[in-house]
Amino acid sequence: SPVPAQVIDKGIPTAGLLAHVMIAKFADHLPLYRQESIFGRAGLAIPRSTLAQWVGVTGMQLQPLVDALRDVVLGQQVIHADETPVQMLAPGSKKTHRSYVWAYATSQFSDSAAVVYDFSPSRAGEHARNFLQGWKGKLVCDDFGGYKASFELGVTEITC
């Protein structure tokens, strides 16, 4: 009988194991070094470098889902937006620098509940403008100046 498709081509981990690692990391805030220890106690030697590769590949495999959620959000007449700082360690650097994750969500009155997170290396308004490019509607956001450029492109500001 044919072998079922794997998330990682010719990979060992099942979709269930990859989902467990992703949920533990992102929903439960469990770092990979702790997951490595937990798996080790269960008799499974899975190095954190392997876990990190799995997270990266799985994230890439989820891109079609992200694109679909983005389409749902941008299909709304009202979008809620906010940005939050995150510390990022650049490859080869020993110091972190401030990056941002921008969240765009459907309204509580929408038939579709969806949130899309958009990473950017800075808080520059171009990131919001690029995400919202071509969209016309009402944007619920704070008074951060980075959203102002979008208001010139047919987006109506609704302050929160």
Image (spheres, helix red, strand yellow):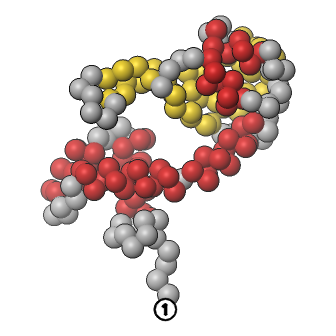
Q: How many numbered badges does the structure rendering display? A: 1
Compared to residue 14, the image places residue 104 above or below, namely above
Horizontal side of 109 relative to 160 (left or right) equals right
Q: Quadrant of residue 139?
A: top right
Taking 75 as reference, is 46 left or right?
left
Instruction: Find residue 103 and report its horizontal and vertical position in percent.
Output: 59, 29
Residue at the spot 78% in from the left edge and 15% down from the top edge: 151
Q: Which quadrant, please, contains the C terminus?
A: top right
109 or 116, which is in the foreground? 116
- Please name the residue shown 41% across and 50% down the image: 56
Residue that extends furthest to the bottom in the rendered view of this protein = 1
Reading the image, the residue beneath label 1 is: 1
Residue type at mark 1: give it: Ser
Please state if 123 lies on the left or on the right of 76 as rendered: left
In the rendered image, is residue 11 in sight?
A: yes
Frontmost residue, 21 versus 3: 3
Residue 80 in sight in this render: no
Q: Is residue 110 depicted above or below 44 in this figure?
A: above
Task: Tell me residue 123's x, y (percent).
Answer: 53, 18
Other-residue count near label 1 (Cα within 10 Å), few / some / many at <14 / 14–19 / ≥20: few
In this picture, is 1 found above or below 154? below
What residue is shown at x 68% (from left), y 41% (from top)? Answer: 70
Q: In the image, residue 52 lies at what x, y percent?
A: 32, 50
Whole-percent x, y for residue 137 in the image: 82, 25
2, 159: nearer the viewer: 2
Q: Is residue 67 above or below residue 142?
A: below
